Amino acid sequence: MYKHILIATDGSALANQAVEHGLALAKQDKARVTELWSATDIAHEVRQGRPDPVGRYEEVEAAAAKKILDWAAQRATAHGLSCDLVHVKDQHPAEGIIVTANDKGCDLIVMASHGRRGVSRLMLGSKAYEVLSHCKVPALIVR
């Protein structure tokens, strides 16, 4: 049914479940896989009290992306699949997911939802909701 599945991950346990679900679906459909990681949270570095968070941002982001995407690639290999790995820099995660899905010609996006509701969802936003609201590519949200 699907020919090219984009699997978005942030490295969290819930996102890892979405990676596994997306890979199983890709294997079943013999679909190509692109795995994507995107983050723009310099504030986390500030909260940790680290000096010069802006100067270290790209180094920290690249290391995190490598770790997360290497794990995703290992899981794809375990499912007998190869995958393209994409680290989206300097873009809001939902925007990066949408742009990558369109640029790569994906026909499905698989991603996790943390299931926040009420005020926490309003304040933190929801990447899954943003993708669903702004993307023409169908999305499978794993909870």
Image (cartoon, grey):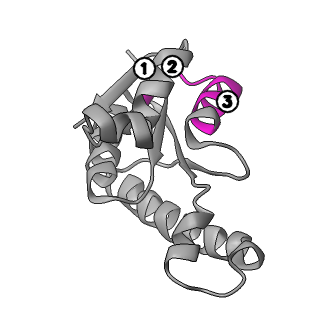
Horizontal placement of 122 versus 53: left or right? left
Within-10-Å neighbours for mark 3: few <14, some 14–19, many 20+? some
* Quadrant holding the N terminus: top left
The residue tagged 2 is 107
The residue tagged 1 is 2
Q: Would residue 23 be visible to someone looking at this image? A: yes
- The type of residue carrying mark 2 is Asp
**What secondary structure is the magenta-colored segment mainly?**
helix
User: Is residue 94 on the magenta stretch?
Assistant: no
Residue 99's label in the rendered image is: 3
Tell me how far mark 3 sits from mark 1, CA to CA.
Answer: 19 Å
Residue in front for this viewpoint, 44 or 61 = 44
Q: Residue at x 72, y 70 (%)?
A: 58
Q: Mark 2 or mark 1, which has the lower sequence index?
A: 1
The segment highlighted magenta reads 96-109
Q: Nearer the viewer, mark 2 or mark 3?
A: 3
Please state the horizontal and vertical placement of residue 27, each as a whole percent of the image: 33, 37
- The type of residue carrying mark 3 is Val
> Quadrant of residue 52 in the image?
bottom right
Tell me how far mark 2 sits from mark 3, CA to CA.
Answer: 13 Å
- The type of residue carrying mark 1 is Tyr
| Residue 42 vertical position relative to residue 129 in the rendered view, above or below | below
